[in-house]
Image (tube, helix red, strand yellow):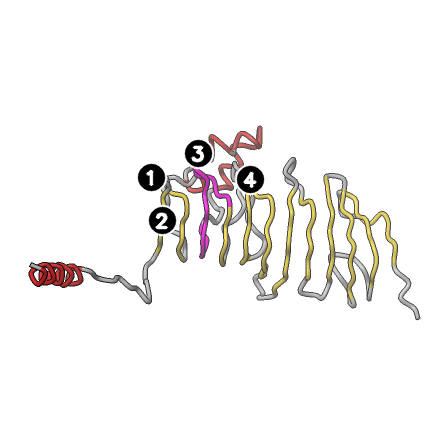
């Protein structure tokens, strides 16, 4: 009986191992991935560009008109007119909340914010509030002529104004920019003419510009030895 039991156990083990298989994938090649939550709602889009999602507010004109256009008041019709030309694609990852609003975008050629077209092609990360309004980002912006600048930005959640930006521009200017509806304060330095600082020649110090972009005050550091 002991021998018979051993034979049975060995047979079961052999059969079990015969049906057991390890699935291992060294490379997965695909055009896109959509990850759903437990309720079947699209939540993460991965691709180059990201795949279309029926749940994404960004690409649903009815939802855009419902959720975003009213914020522009009398200009809501013009907003919808301009919105159709915005770039909604991203080569990378877009994470949405349960309502379908973009929360985090990571990758190359990031989508435009829902308030206007980007002046530069942007690679990096942007983050939005729960209704899809952009509140900041970090990355590299590349202009049409191929010049690049590194930027970290924080936006004002109570307005469309840019609040705080840290930049390293293509002309060598480095600056911290703090702004609101009245103007902007810039702490920066440049060894040459700078369009941001509006200086001729080298400058290191602080400048304040009004809402029209006119300089109203400056304090330059004395760099003489």
Of label 1 and label 4, which has the lower sequence position?
A: 1
In the rendered view, does 181 fall on the left or right side of 17?
A: right
Q: Earlier in the sequence, mark 3 or mark 2?
A: 2
List the residue tagged with mark 2: 34
Q: Disc 1 and disc 4: Cα gap in Å?
A: 22 Å
Q: Which mark is residue 215?
A: none
Q: Residue drawn at (49%, 39%), measured in percent from left and top?
A: 81
Give 8 or 104, whichever is nearer the viewer: 8
Rendered location of residue 209, percent (x, y): 79, 48
For marks 3 and 4, the one nearer the N-term is 3
Magenta region? 89-103
- The residue indicated by pointer 1 is 40
Camera-nearest label, 1 or 4: 1
Q: CA distance from mark 3 to mark 2?
A: 20 Å
Residue position marked by numbered label 4 in the rendering: 129
Camera-side mark, 3 or 4: 4
Residue sticking out furthest to the front: 1
> Which tag, 1 or 3, sits closer to the chain's start?
1
Instruction: Characterize the local packing of mark 2: few (<14), some (14-19) or many (20 or more) Cα atoms within 10 angstroms.
Output: some
x 46%, y 35%: residue: 64
């Amino acid at each position: 009986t002991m021998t018979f039991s051993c034979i049975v156990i060995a047979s079961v083990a052999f059969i079990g191992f015969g049906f057991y298989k390890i699935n291992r994938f060294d490379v997965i090649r695909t055009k896109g991935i959509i990850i759903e939550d437990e309720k079947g709602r699209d939540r993460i889009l991965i691709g180059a560009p990201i795949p279309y999602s029926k749940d994404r507010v960004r690409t649903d004109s009815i939802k855009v008109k419902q959720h975003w256009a009213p914020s522009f008041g009398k200009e809501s019709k013009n907003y919808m007119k301009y919105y159709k030309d915005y770039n909604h694609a991203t080569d990378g990852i877009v994470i949405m909340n349960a309502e379908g609003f973009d929360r985090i975008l990571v990758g190359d050629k990031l989508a435009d914010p829902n308030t206007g077209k980007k002046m530069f092609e942007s690679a990096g990360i942007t983050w939005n509030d729960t209704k899809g309004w952009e509140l900041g980002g970090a990355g590299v912006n590349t202009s049409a002529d191929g010049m690049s600048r590194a930027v970290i930005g924080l936006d004002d959640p109570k307005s469309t104004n840019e609040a705080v930006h840290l930049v390293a521009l293509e002309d060598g200017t480095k600056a911290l920019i703090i702004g609101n509806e009245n103007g902007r304060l810039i702490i920066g330095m440049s060894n040459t003419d700078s369009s941001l600082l509006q200086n001729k020649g080298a400058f290191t110090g602080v400048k304040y510009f009004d809402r029209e972009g006119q300089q109203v005050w400056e304090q330059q550091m004395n760099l003489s030895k």
